[in-house]
Amino acid sequence: MRRPRVPSFRLPLVAASLAAVVAASGCAISSDGGGGGGGDGDKTVLTFWSYYVGAQKTWLDGRVAAFEKANPDIDVQVVETVGDQQDQRLLASVATKTTPDLFINNIVVDFPTLVAGGVTADLTPYWEKYADAGQWPEQAAWKNDGKVYNLLPFTNLLGMYYNKDVLAESGITEPPKTLDELQEDLATVKAGGKYEGLALSGAPTVEGAWLFAPQLLGEQVDYCTWADSGPKVSAAFDRLGSWTSAGYIPQAAATWDQNDSWQQFVTGRYAFAFNGNWQLGNGGDAAFQWGTAQYPAPTGGSSVVYPGGEGFGIGETSKNKDLAWKFLQEAILSPEAGEQIFTTAGSIPVRSDAAQSSAIQDDANALPFATAAQSTGQWPNNPETATAQTALGTAVSSVISGQATPADAAASATDGIAKALAEGGGTCR
């Protein structure tokens, strides 16, 4: 099935502090609505702040329309916001007690800032009574101090794409399941002299970090355990250095973002690519047969990737929390919503029965991503997560470009991650 083109994951933005935002704004958000409350006649109005565009907006508009049809006494007003202004406006709305009834946020980076700023309502009482909570993996409910504040109903994550024609011509009968097997296959392709090995983003940004991190996540090394995992970190950077030296990864990848690396893959020159589920709908650009697999597992570990995507929350000062939860439960968390976000925008539903829908199960290329969504890595609960990622991405890029040795890059990443987490308050879980 050819799905519409979907955008890459939204890049995290470092949120401003509450004090700075209040000082900068100085007044209430008014004309575009906040806090819910008054209705049209007998209707109750729920305000929903969203920065969705394109296919995701189409999905949300459809879910709102279905909910309003089933609940004619509720009017859900979607207020279109700008993504890189969302945090600031949400934080400012706390001071004026005008938080929206519902909102989305870039969960990876925004979560700790919005919780600390008092934006997000405690969803624990609702989640504990939610009959379908067992359909969700633990990572779907984002917690702070044991309380649920955000929900991740669908996600965007990484996997491996492979060129079936190149593998067949090279005598490779199946895609690699481990990094060791991938290394062997890269050597085979390189020895053939006709094709390139691996296309990936090695940019000195969060993208480069996102693509590299799974090589350690599968060994239970994440940003929170990084400082105590020196040998594993060094081994991963040594592997990256050896792949670059052997020509399995081109030096140009040090500046590629994920769209750049995808465009390289669809030329047909590369045997493999690390990229995300949002590229599934773009496969028609390729003039060759291709397939997908989970991100290769490190030796002795498993395939684990980080989840990306939006969290859904309820505003702390909302006067309609019960109705806002009703909307989330019926319009966002339902199996139908999960299947529709996949068919409309290519995102992977986290709810297990939604992942079992025929739309996904009949799409062989989507299955590895659906499997990965059921067991993902845990992001730090720290407002400087984006800074920590940038430190890692910069180190990865420096190895691919040849500007730093693997040892120096590993040390730089370790120092940068530790510094970022400390500046964010030192907490991680």
Image (cartoon, rainbow, N blue to C red):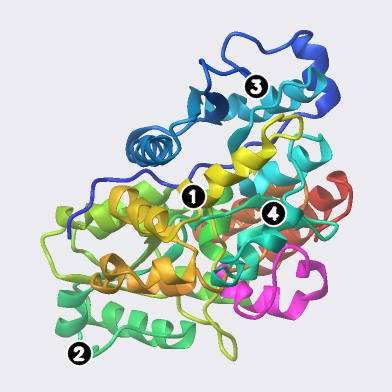
From the image, tell me which residue sits under label 4: 126
Above or below for 344 versus 234? above
Name the residue nearer the viewer: 92 or 358: 358
- How far across and down, in percent of the image, does residue 172 sit? 24, 88
Label 1: element kind: helix
Q: Which residue position holds label 1?
A: 330
The picture places residue 95, in percent across and down from the top left corner, at 82, 20
Between residue 58 and residue 393, name the one nearer to us: 58
Foreground mark, 3 or 2, reads 3
Amino acid type for the residue under numbered disc 4: Tyr
Tell me the residue that label 2 is attached to.
171
Label placed on residue 37: 3
Closer to us: 191 or 420: 420
Query: On the rendered structure, is 33 left or right of 90?
Result: left
Q: CA distance from mark 4 to mark 3?
A: 20 Å
Q: What segment is highlighted magenta in the picture?
A: 214-235
- Distance, label 3 to label 2, CA atoms, is 65 Å
User: Which residue occupies 37% across, 84% down?
Assistant: 176
Reading the chain from its start, which is encountered first: label 2 or label 1?
Answer: 2
| Image: 314 above or below 77 | below
Given the current orientation, which residue lies at the most extreme left position? 287
Q: Amino acid at mark 1?
A: Glu
